Structure formats: structure tokens, C-alpha cells
Amino acid sequence: MDRWAGRVALVTGASKGIGAAIARALVKNGMVVVGCARHVEDMQIAKENLASEKGRLIPMKCDLSKTEEIESMFQEIKEQLGGADVCVNNAGISFFQDCKSGSVTDTKALYDVNFFAAMTVSQLTIRSLQERNMDDGHIINIGSACGMVIHTDYPCHTYSTAKFALGAFTESLRHELRKEKTKIRTTIINPGWVNTPLVNVKNTENVFEPGKSLQPDDVASAVTYVLEAPPNVNIGYCRISMLAESIKTVTFTCLP
């Protein structure tokens, strides 16, 4: 992680759970982390707790369902820090509903945050890199095991469709960047069940077993793992699950 010291990373949904763990890990590794969420109170506390670390945390309030707020946030990052070098699209919402009868309004809200916000943040990060003639940024999208296979017994099918879309977007972006012969990398990380506040709130049918689930820090370790890859190596896909080792499957490719 030494080469990322002092560089700027944007982590969405950084106030709680996985996002908070990722922000914390990157700060400890010396990065300047912009943490964004609709509520910044927890991030302000985290900022104080991380004051002695090598990096620093900068909380920013942003409603990711609103494109204009994302654009304003990037303008603020540009003015304060020059731009973003890494983005971690972690923010997400979940509605436990099926495709046959799920609310269209809820599904639109889910896609706004889980897919369209990630797409907008990725595009603006690439634009920021290219405007500064930087060629070694990284787009990291936090997917899900639900974005790899449809779980027939769990009522999370509309959530799965958004995560499948995020995976397709990540891979499509990787091919487009390779065609341009840039070393900007893209990765999708697909965790299994993670013990987070969102999971505990939605765990009305005992779908998740916290004692057997991943912890947010496990996902944060996967993020630092892919960032630590040599500059000419792209880990395009990373799946983590509860085995002897947190990181189960990775797919490597060489950059141009």
C-alpha cells in the first residue's frame, strides 16, 4: 500500500458497516479518505478516532440518489484535494422482495443507489484522473454473492438484479479502459453474508447467521488486497466467503 500513501480515495456509504471498515483501513494505510454518506455524525467521530493514523478521514455529506449532489461532491474534492485517485462504491440499500410483485418505486430507489450512483462515481473518478493525466487509479465496486447466483429461497431477487448489473458494468468498464491502454484498474468484490447493521435490521427471516458471517473488516482486507497488487496487474474479480481464508477466489489479468 506504500504507493497509495497520500493519495485520495472516495468511499461511499462510509458511515457504518463495510464502508466504515474500508475507510478506516485505507486511513491506517496512509490514504486521504473522503467518506460520504447522507449522515456524517458517525464519520466525524471516526475522524477523531483516526487522527493519529498515517492518513486522514474527510467526511462529506452526500445523497447518492441525487446525481447533482454527487457532482457537487466531486467539485468539492477537486477544490480541496485536487481529485480522486481511487473510488470504492460501497453504498447500498436492500429491499427483501421478489421480482414478480416487488414495488417498482422501491426497485427504482434501489437501482439509484446500488447501480446508478456507482456508475456516476466511477465515471467522475475516471474523469478526475484523466484531467490530471493520472494513469494508475482504481475503481472498486462492492458487489455481493447475490450478484453471482440467484438464491431461490431468499426474497432478495430485485437486489440481485442490481448487483448482477454492477458486475456487468465493472467488467465492461475494464474492457473499455484496456482498449484505451490505460492502467486505471477496475475490480468487483463479491462478499458472502456480512454481519452489518443493514443485515441485522433486515434479518426478519433468520436468513443470516451473524456468528457464521463475514465481518466488515474482512471486506476491508479484500479492498487493501486488490490495491496492493502490482501496478501492471488488475484483479478484476474477488469473491470472499467464510473459509479458512477470507479471500476465496481472485481473477488476475495483466494491463497493457
Image (cartoon, rainbow, N blue to C red):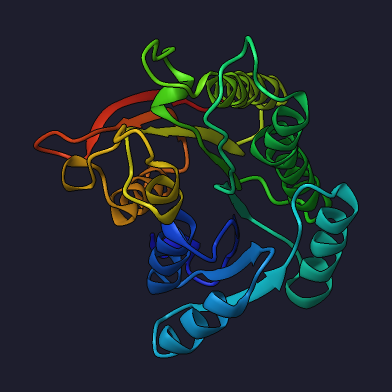
Residue at horizontal 28 percent and vertical 50 percent from the top: 218
Marks counted in the figure total 0
Up-down relation of residue 21 to residue 46 (above or below): above
On the image, the x and y values in percent for residue 84 come to: 69, 59
Up-down relation of residue 55 to residue 78 (above or below): below
Considering every residue shown, the one lying at the far left of the view is 244
Residue at horizontal 44 percent and vertical 23 percent from the top: 146
For the residue pair 15 and 74, the one nearer the viewer reads as 15
Image quarter hosting the C terminus = top right
For the residue pair 37 and 249, the one nearer the viewer reads as 37
For the residue pair 105 and 48, the one nearer the viewer reads as 105
Up-down relation of residue 245 to residue 167 (above or below): below
On the image, the x and y values in percent for residue 6 come to: 54, 72
On the image, the x and y values in percent for residue 200 come to: 37, 50
* Lateral position of residue 207 relative to residue 45, left or right: left
On the image, the x and y values in percent for residue 161 come to: 59, 18
Quarter assignment of residue 183: top right
Image quarter hosting the N terminus = bottom left
Considering every residue shown, the one lying at the far right of the view is 68
Residue at horizontal 44 percent and vertical 12 percent from the top: 150
For the residue pair 45 and 247, the one nearer the viewer reads as 45
